[in-house]
Image: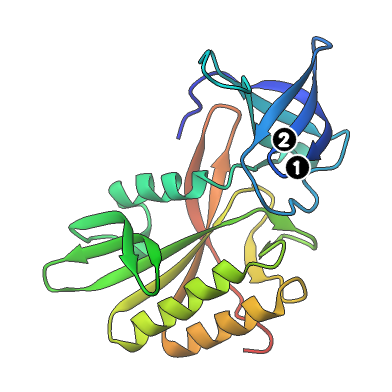
Amino acid sequence: MKFETPLIQGTLLRRYKRFLADILLEDGREVTAHCANPGAMLGLNSPGMKVWLEPSNNPKRKLPFSWRLVELEEGHLAGIDTSLPNRLVGEALAEGRIAEIAGYENYRPEVKYGTGSRVDFLATGEGQADTYIEVKNVHLRREGDWAEFPDCVTTRGAKHLRELALVAQSGRRAVMLFVVQRTDCGRFRLAEDLDPAYARAFAEARAAGVEAIAYQCAITTAEIRLAGPVPVQDPIGG
């Protein structure tokens, strides 16, 4: 996915009210940008961090800037927009770039299933078991090259795992796909200390037959795309 307009650099002053961030641009202007991320953003929202904004010329927009990237150590980048992973996965599925779930005839987004939920993608094909795919954004890193999820308690995420477990138990295929939106990670694991309930739900889902895969992103100031897979560590308690 290419950014629609060239990104501009700034310095983060503060992130507040979950969806707002004040940024100091290189030309001295202070602007408020939309932050498309309701999570804790641990390690990505410290004042003084270099960030990248996407400007918009749409006069109907209340905020003309969207916060897209954070600059990390040694030139690495992290994407902060939690709405992007589904788009990245959609592109990759259409192009057959996710080997574990390639070769299906159709990939339908936002299909109803479970109890009042919508699965991110339903893969179908003649002679193939229906495959239910849930996508989660990952941008937490605390130790080494480990990417971790979640960065805060996610009751909704645990619900999705329980519903995927029911799918797997019914004989259909269920896949949990974690999208690592940062370039300095080479492995994935759960942040069990931040949400023990999610870790338990994950272990139960895995025992029921839910598959777990993680893919890293290639990120530049021009585009973000899904790159290759990274190893997934099952929960210690699992």
* Colouring scheme applied when the structure was drawn: rainbow
| Spatial CA span between label 2 and label 1 | 6 Å
Crowd rating for badge 2 (residues with CA inside 10 Å; few <14, some 14–19, many 20+): some
* Spot occupied by residue 205 in the image (x, y as percentages of width and height): 49, 83
Instruction: Tell me, for residue 17, which label it has, or none.
Output: 1
User: Which residue appears at 75% of the width and 33% of the height?
Assistant: 21
Compared with 162, 98 (above or below) is above
State which quarter of the image contains the N terminus: top left
Quadrant, the C terminus: bottom right
Name the residue that disc number 2 marks: 20
- Residue shown at the point (27%, 55%) measured from the top left: 108
- Is residue 210 visible in the rendered image? The answer is no
The image position of residue 113, as x and y in percent, is 33, 70
From the viewer's perspective, tell me whether residue 174 is left or right of residue 156.
left
Three-letter amino acid code of the residue under disc 2: Leu
Identify the amino acid type marked 1: Lys
Instruction: Give the image location of residue 231, x and y in percent.
Output: 56, 68
Q: Is residue 87 visible?
A: yes
Q: Are marks 2 and 1 in contact (CB under 8 Å)?
A: yes
Q: Residue placed farthest to the right in the image?
A: 48
